[in-house]
Image: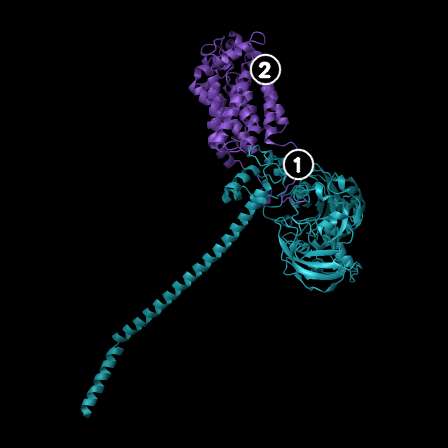
Amino acid sequence: MSLMHVSSPHVHKPGSSVEQVMKQVLLATIPGVLVLTWFFGPGTIINIVFGSALALAFEAWALWLRAKDYKMPLRDHSVIVTATLLCIALPPYAPWWLIAVGIGVSVLLGKHVFGGLGYNPFNPAMVGYVVLLVSFPLQMSSWTEPRGIGEVPGIVDAFTALFAASSYDAVTAATPLDLFRQNSGMLFDDLMQSKAELTGPIAGLGWDWVNLAFLAGGIWLLRQRIFTWHAPVGMLAALTICAALGYDDGSSTGGGSVLFHLFSGATMFGAFFIITDPVSSAVSNKGRLIFGAMVGILVYLIRVHGNYPDAVAFGVLLLNFAAPLIDQYTQPTVYGTKKVEADE
Amino acid sequence: MRQIFDIHGGIHPPERKDMSNPGWVRDCDMPSKLILPVTQHVGSPARPVVEVGDIVLGGQMIAEAQGPVSVPVHAPSSGTVTAIEARAVPHASGLTDTCIEISLDGRDEWVGFEGLDNWRDETKAALLERVRLAGIAGLGGAGFPTAIKLASDRDGGIHTLIINGTECEPYITADDTVMQCFAQQIVEGAEILSHMVGAETVLLAVEDNKPEAVDAMRQAAEALEMAEVVTFPTKYPSGGEKQLIEILLNAQVPSGGIPADIGVLCQNPSTAIAVRDALIDGKPVTHRITTVTGRSLKDPGNRRVMLGTPIKELLDTAGFNADSADRVIHGGPMMGFAVTDLDMPVVKITNCVLAPTRTEIPPPQPQQACIRCGMCAEACPASLLPQQLYWYARAKDQEQLERHNLMDCIECGACAYVCPSHIPLVQYYRSAKGSLRETAKEKVRSDNSRSRFEARQERLEREAAEREAMRAARKAAAEARAQAGDDPVQAAIERAKAKKAQQEAEQ
């Protein structure tokens, strides 16, 4: 026998690997994706499949350019998570080039220019999303009308949309956040009653279910200890407090109700799948609480006072800038360094 | 029931303690030779007092303590000294060290011992000297000279003695076995220790995964009024000295300090027995209970082993299958180090020799990029941010390493255990700690040279100033004389003139 000279610890937690973490994140998106499919048709799933394939290709290319070993990074599923998160955020039935640009930006500019997995200061999916949102506002706001299975476009339509020369001309509809943003003359409750898209039980047809589904997936991830509660709770609590403070019984210029904010747009998706990206967020639990809360505040401010209907992507990217600063001031108290009270 | 407290983090690795059948201890077969390193403790090496060819008896001192932080080494059986030379010794860095090799004669003849009839009558200094001469160094695995630990007297003294029978490392059952088999001796040792340091409370701490040990200790503790057996939930690394103190007393040892700073003394059960044996029987440390375990052994278990027994011989007595193992670990799987040479001996700190199969403990997986998931920070018992320390260690950013309290890392390995990227974090920290220590030493050296340089500079300036002052003083004196009319030059000229005038007059 030859004696292996390895350093302690000699044992490792069974099943703990990057691949496993990424797999669990992917699994946790399933409820949300299914609900999106129920209300909007197979567009999201096709986005994800197409986007993931492209992402793997971009990742392989980037690794080849950087002369890196490509086997392990391609197997760790991290680029598929990036692609999935971006594709969930894209409108279903987006044209192929929109997805390609988004994935390319995410993988190349969001991740590999900084050194690949673990080195990116910004959330790659959100980098891709924001580039698309700023560059192609028309395509990025073309969400179809939420209807329910049977009334949504079929698989064939979805593929046609993906490769159509012009953009897909199915019935597109403004999302509740769009309507809320554009509203200037109606009381909040009247607005909620006025359009079919808004008559869901909480925050608009389909969207509340989408949010509930991502919430469920997120809670499962929390129970799997993939992340701690701090960032999501920080964001949701801050958003709740802001919405509660800004709510004026539903005037036409008010901020919208707490439930409307919690269950609209990308709130739950953002809280559990975007701001929990560990690489680009703050490191300590206290830091993550602050990180989440700041995103929550920004989301509210941009939704109510900004030019964009939703704001998770902007909020997250702005806070990615701030993460190192937050880290600087939120170092946890290390064992034995507590101030002794008797000294006072 | 005493209230217990929780520590931050911690992990629950598979325990695999049943494999070594705790509660039973057998003598290891007598080896053919013993290899006794002169350094089996933390501190300066002992100095050999025997020469090659000398006949030694069991219990005879073969190397004496050198300096205050040092303990002697005793022969565990009778035989002939056949070599004194550098050999591979158990050390994380695979170092060699001076070892005394004894070929055993098999007769196992011993020197006589003289114990104390009444240790209570002795002074603390006399008791400490006996502990030191018995060669006792922390038998739990740390190996710090026990006499030094007992002597460290801080303000306020010691109020609580903790006998640390936690044994949170997977696989190891040596302390468990000692507690089950020798509970009475442990309590006697604890009584002596508490007398020596003046502790009022003795806590016998056992993790709740050792119910037999708890029972045995409870029974034995009835003999000592101030003693109390405390159990707490099984979690790694509850047995770390600092962690255990937090669990039992809800107090923290200050960063960079020792338990005595907050009036606490921790001792391993075997160390307590060694102290008892040293004082009551006069016997030095020559044997220890070691867990020999792992699936590469047919007959794992706890053995009473002579110090100096080559690990190879110990493994062979347990039915070692060398083909199924690709590493042998000295200590436990969390904090132990890989043995680089099977001729390495069992020493005072060898609480376990682990020979796992390749499937039992597979080779390490390739390291992946850190994704800063923070699982390490959740597992760290010292509330450090291991992911940040890793970045700073790689960047060699000493300022940030210090700011993030690298030196408070106890190297328990919980972070690396949970790391999904399989990063050998502890290895990075050990190396970074080494550099920090080196820098600190360097700083002391450069501070010394600077102060020496400054002192020299100051002296040179002072001397120059003194010379200048003297010159000035002479000048002033000369000027003063000139003014007073007794200018020496003028006087000389006068004298010469007078002389010349006289000569002319004579002619």
Which numbered circle lies on residue B291?
Answer: none
The local secondary structure at tag 1 comes to: loop
- The quadrant where residue A138 appears: top left
Percent coordinates x, y for residue B214 in the rendering: 77, 42
- The quadrant where residue B490 appears: bottom left
What is the crowding at mark 1: few (fewer than 14 residues within 10 Å), some, or many (at least 20)? many
Farthest residue in the bottom direction? Answer: B506
Chain B: give its colour. cyan
Nearest the viewer among B52 and A267 is B52
Q: Amino acid at mark 2?
A: Val
Residue A76's place in the image compared with A201, above or below, is below
Please give the residue where the numbered disc 2 appears in the rendered image.
Answer: A35
Chain ID at mark 2: A
Residue B65's place in the image compared with A105, above or below, is below
Q: Amino acid at mark 1?
A: Ile
Percent coordinates x, y for residue B364 in the rendering: 62, 38
Residue drawn at x 74%, y 47% is: B315
Chain A: give its colour. purple
Which numbered circle lies on residue B11?
Answer: 1
B166 with respect to B440 (left or right):
right
